[in-house]
Amino acid sequence: MMVNKRLNPLNILLIEDSPADVLLTKNALADAKVPYHLYNVNDGRHAMSFLRREDRYATAPRPDIILLDLNLPVKDGREVLAELKLDKDLMRIPIIVLTTSEREEDIKAAYDLHANCYIVKPIDFDQFCNVIKSIENFWFATVALAQS
């Protein structure tokens, strides 16, 4: 198995409004095999400001990967996904939809908007940790990600 050899820590943007899910993600990543920085914004408007380095996010790093919830306040995840994939400067950032929605129309819509992956969040803590570990093993350690 090829291991992603990065010189710098991986920048992960978590777009999630649930404080409990943010904490779960942080805890699940606690023993990550690759160095990373986790950034969190809690709505779609702030996500786009972070990604475009606007206002208070002027010095924000470009994420190497995005974990995106669909059900967000202000601007939902579908809108964020659509904007990202239409933006020439941001469209190559891999986006993993990580959401509670199991609705077939949400899954189809996410892939129609060019999500790289769609994962339904498990409710059980151990299963959630396993999902995060599988994301880490594949996306953080195996896949060659474009350098910022």
Image: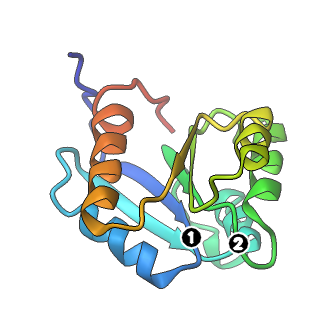
Q: Are marks 2 and 1 in contact (CB under 8 Å)?
A: yes
Q: Amino acid at mark 1?
A: Glu
Q: Which mark is residue 60?
A: none
Q: Position of residue 133 (x, y in %)?
A: 27, 47
Q: Position of residue 10 (x, y in %)?
A: 36, 47
Q: Is residue 89 visible?
A: no
In the rendered image, which quarter contains the N terminus? top left
Name the residue tied to disc 2.
Answer: 72
Q: Distance between the Cα atoms at labels 2 and 1?
A: 7 Å
Q: Is residue 25 left or right of residue 117?
A: left
Q: Nearer the viewer, residue 92 or 131?
A: 131
Dot 2: what SS?
loop
Q: Nearer the viewer, residue 122 or 17?
A: 122
Which residue is rendered at x = 41% and y = 67% of the image?
123
Q: Nearer the viewer, residue 38 or 17?
A: 17
Question: Which color scheme did the rendering employ for the protein?
Answer: rainbow
Q: Which mark is residue 16?
A: 1
Alpha-carbon neighbours of circle 2 within 10 Å: few (<14), some, or many (≥20)? many
Which residue is rendered at x = 49% and y = 29% of the image?
146
Q: Is residue 144 left or right of residue 46?
A: left
Q: Amino acid at mark 2?
A: Leu
Q: Position of residue 12 (x, y in %)?
A: 44, 54
Q: Is residue 107 left or right of residue 146?
A: right
Dot 1: what SS?
loop
